Image: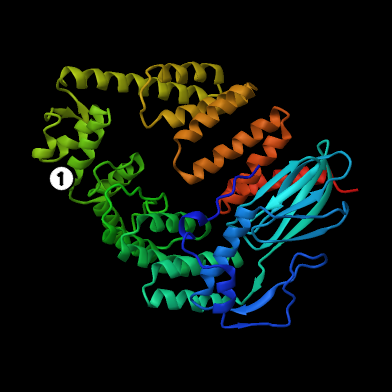
């Protein structure tokens, strides 16, 4: 069952007005429209013109629908289209033997609930649009249906955008959040998504609201492409917030050697943090490496981070390049030859350095054997590295290589476990897409087509710009062709 995340409606609808207030506040309605929406036939909608107050009422109406849990039931099994209001459930009877399903198409950026219960298919979503579902009987394709999810109110996207602009110009963050939420519910995957996200980021930065900034960055990262100007705007908003615990998204950490100004602005943001992530440190290392004159403060910052996080050997390399000063007191300067330590580390750091060196040796030997297609030997070396039981950065890669090795030796059950371990540690979205795809294909090898379809559908829906999404779509298309509708 899909677990739906409803824009955290409960968090910001506590003070929403009632539906009756919405009707009173609406500037204009079509009085000829039938108000009794749930009586048979095509579901009716009411034409309105939004104003800055009406959006709050629409969200309140949807929230009430979610709490009420109304179910619109259909009794006809064989039909192509079904209608339901946003926030309500729709119940569809299944034919004899129909026992599984796959969401073949849904509007980009949407979430939904979908499950089979007591011989019926139940669906619910807060996002308007058409949802195409493939239904199967004993693993064979049976039919395709379309669920049309409709708002009770009909208004234009331009009208909605004008309300968004009014809230933005008046610096009304709550009103802006409400009107943007309505826009995304009514018009998912709009060409205006990027623009209105930056409106929210701007006001949230002025208000010090890191929660909204993070949500919007995540949204932009999933569904749009950020250019250098976009990223600079995000960084400027984060500077206003001054939250030292804010974790930068992977889109901001995509290093581009030609964007020196952006790189430096992001680096300046990172070094204000008390506890940066591994990905943020890797970004700093790239900035450090391209500087014609080494930045001593940056080198010391990177070095001390590695020392504090258990990699004394690598930390010493960065600290020795700088003046060390006060921040370098964690580890004394040591002589090096060709970048390698030639002096003696203190006892604790010496043991840690030996552990890491041995760890890397096993890891590199495992990779060499993997590349030579000696998969059994590769597994031995990778497992020896894991026995050192340290959370070094290479751990996620070791699990990934183990998954690949087990897959190629047809040990699919172990491959799934290793892929999932790698997925738990991986933060890069492109790599995540690859791992999800591999898990899906491994389930296919195990004969679990339902799990395979679930994972590959997830890749297609959540990593649209990834080549793994294309591969997942090809697999799903082959499944449809293999079990065509009679």
> What residue is disc 1 on?
296
Q: Which of 444/294 is in front? A: 444
Q: Residue at x 20, y 19 (%)?
A: 348
Q: How is the image coloured?
A: rainbow
Residue extending furthest toward the left: 325
Label 1 crowding class (10 Å Cα cut-off): few <14, some 14-19, many 20+?
some
Image side of residue 151 versus residue 242, left or right: right
Determine if residue 192 is in view.
no
Please count the marks in the image. Answer: 1
Q: Quadrant of residue 216?
A: bottom left
Please, is residue 232 above or below residue 105 in the view? below
Q: Position of residue 339 (x, y in %)?
A: 22, 32
Q: Residue at x 27, y 31 (%)?
A: 309
Please, is residue 110 above or below residue 279 in the view? below
Q: Quadrant of residue 242?
A: bottom left
Image side of residue 300 versus residue 28, left or right: left
Q: Position of residue 194 (x, y in %)?
A: 48, 66
Please, is residue 199 above or below residue 379 in the view? below
- Quadrant of the image containing the N terminus: top right
């Amino acid at each position: 069952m899909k677990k739906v995340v409803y824009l955290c409606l409960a968090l910001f609808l506590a003070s929403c007005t009632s539906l009756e207030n919405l009707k009173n506040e609406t500037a204009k309605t079509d009085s000829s429209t039938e108000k009794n929406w749930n009586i048979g036939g095509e579901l009716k909608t009411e034409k309105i013109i939004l104003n800055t107050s009406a959006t709050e009422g629409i969200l309140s109406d949807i929230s009430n629908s979610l709490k009420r849990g109304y179910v619109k039931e259909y009794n006809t099994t064989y039909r192509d289209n079904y209608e339901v209001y946003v926030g309500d459930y729709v119940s569809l009877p299944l034919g004899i033997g129909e026992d599984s399903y796959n969401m073949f198409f849904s509007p980009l950026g949407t979430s939904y609930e979908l499950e089979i219960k007591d011989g019926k298919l139940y669906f619910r979503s807060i996002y308007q649009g058409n949802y195409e579902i493939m239904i199967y009987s004993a693993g064979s394709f049976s039919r395709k249906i379309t669920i049309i999810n409709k708002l009770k109110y009909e208004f234009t996207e331009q009208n909605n955008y004008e309300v968004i602009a009014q809230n933005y110009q008046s610096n009304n963050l709550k009103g802006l959040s409400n009107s943007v939420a309505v826009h995304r519910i009514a018009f998912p995957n709009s060409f205006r998504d990027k623009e209105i996200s930056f409106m929210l980021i701007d006001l949230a930065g002025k208000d010090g609201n890191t929660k909204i900034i993070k949500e919007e960055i995540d949204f932009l990262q999933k569904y749009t492409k950020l250019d250098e100007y976009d990223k600079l705007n995000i960084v400027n908003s984060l500077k206003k917030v001054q939250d030292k615990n804010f974790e930068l998204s992977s889109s901001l950490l995509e290093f581009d050697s030609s964007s020196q100004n952006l790189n430096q602005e992001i680096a300046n943001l990172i070094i204000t943090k008390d506890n940066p992530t591994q990905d943020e440190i890797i970004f700093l290392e790239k900035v450090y490496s391209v500087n014609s004159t080494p930045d001593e403060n940056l080198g010391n910052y990177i070095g001390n981070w590695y020392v504090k996080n258990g990699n004394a050997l690598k930390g010493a390399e960065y600290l020795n390049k700088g003046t060390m000063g006060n921040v370098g007191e964690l580890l004394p300067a040591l002589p090096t030859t060709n970048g390698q330590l030639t002096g003696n580390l203190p006892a604790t750091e010496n043991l840690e350095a030996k552990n890491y060196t041995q760890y890397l040796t096993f890891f590199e030997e495992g990779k060499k054997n993997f590349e030579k297609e000696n998969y059994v030997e590769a597994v031995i070396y990778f497992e020896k590295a894991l026995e050192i039981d340290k959370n070094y950065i290479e751990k996620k890669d070791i699990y990934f290589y183990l998954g690949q090795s087990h897959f190629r030796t047809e040990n699919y059950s172990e491959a799934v476990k290793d892929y999932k371990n790698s997925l738990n540690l991986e933060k890069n979205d492109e790599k995540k897409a690859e791992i999800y795809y591999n898990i899906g294909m491994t389930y296919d090898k195990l004969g679990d087509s339902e799990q395979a379809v679930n994972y590959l559908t997830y890749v297609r829906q959540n990593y649209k710009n990834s080549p793994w999404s294309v591969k997942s779509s090809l697999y799903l298309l082959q499944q449809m062709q293999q079990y065509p509708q009679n």
